[in-house]
Image (cartoon, rainbow, N blue to C red):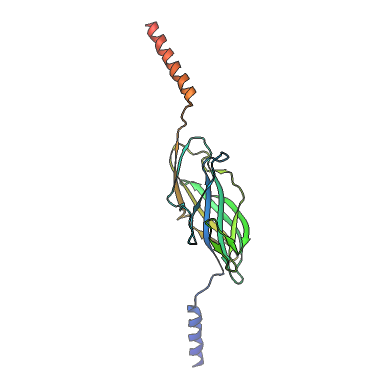
Amino acid sequence: MIRRLLASAALVVAALPSWAGTGVFGSYLAIDPDGPGAAAATWYGATQPGPATLTAFNGVNLGTFVLGSTATIAGGELLSWKNGTGNVTGGVLHWRVDSGTFQDLTINFTANSTFVDRAGNTFSNTGDQRWAALASTSTNFLAGVAAGAHTLQVYFTAFTNEGNRDSGSVTAPFSANFTVTSAVPEPGSAALLLAGMGLIAFRRRQWR
């Protein structure tokens, strides 16, 4: 009888959920369409946790860029939580263009609760954390990209003592579209080119 009770108790314990002590609940990134130029960076939402939201990064059209120009990943934000003995130790924004290799941008710790996220939502639960200090804000995702239609793909990872916690993933990243066009000659250069072509045609007629 005692053995049966012990066996039943063991089954009940095994059936109980295993509660995680860490996780992520929000992520954002900023794109600066002209790098060091005058245009301001635009923030987009990846995983959006509150009633206030930004334009979703997934599926957005980032615009058209001229070949050789600069556009940067200018900011990143990751929201994490921890309970009990759980601990979050770092954050990363992973990015790639098209099907290239993902590259990493470290996101450093910014604040414990209470804090306001990029979209304007306030979070005050004990253990909530904001990671929003991107180690580099000058990563040019257009570098080496040829003319044509492309995608910029990202996902986020929080490193914890229980393993990695992701917002998006390698196989299901957040993906935005953009186009790169060939450089257009300056008006003065185009005029000189046309004048030169006209002179060549005129000389050929004279030779005939």
- At horizontal 53% and vertical 49% (from top left) the residue drawn is 30
Q: Residue furthest bottom?
A: 1
Whether residue 181 can be seen here: yes
* Quadrant assignment, res 164: bottom right
Q: Quadrant of the C terminus?
A: top left
Q: Residue furthest top?
A: 207
- At horizontal 40% and vertical 10% (from top left) the residue drawn is 202
- At horizontal 48% and vertical 57% (from top left) the residue drawn is 53
The percent position of residue 187, horizontal first and vertical second, equals 47, 25
Check the image and report above or below for 67 versus 191: below
The percent position of residue 43, horizontal first and vertical second, equals 52, 50
* Quadrant assignment, res 148: top left
The percent position of residue 66, horizontal first and vertical second, equals 48, 35
Count of numbered circles in the view: 0
Please name whichever residue, 159 or 113, is drawn nearer the observer in this view of the structure: 113
Check the image and report above or below for 173 versus 82: above
The percent position of residue 81, horizontal first and vertical second, equals 57, 65
Check the image and report above or below for 142 versus 193: below
* Quadrant assignment, res 178: top left
Left or right: 170 as drawn, with respect to 109: left
Check the image and report above or below for 19 versus 57: below
Left or right: 56 as drawn, with respect to 20: left
Please name whichever residue, 42 or 83, is drawn nearer the observer in this view of the structure: 42
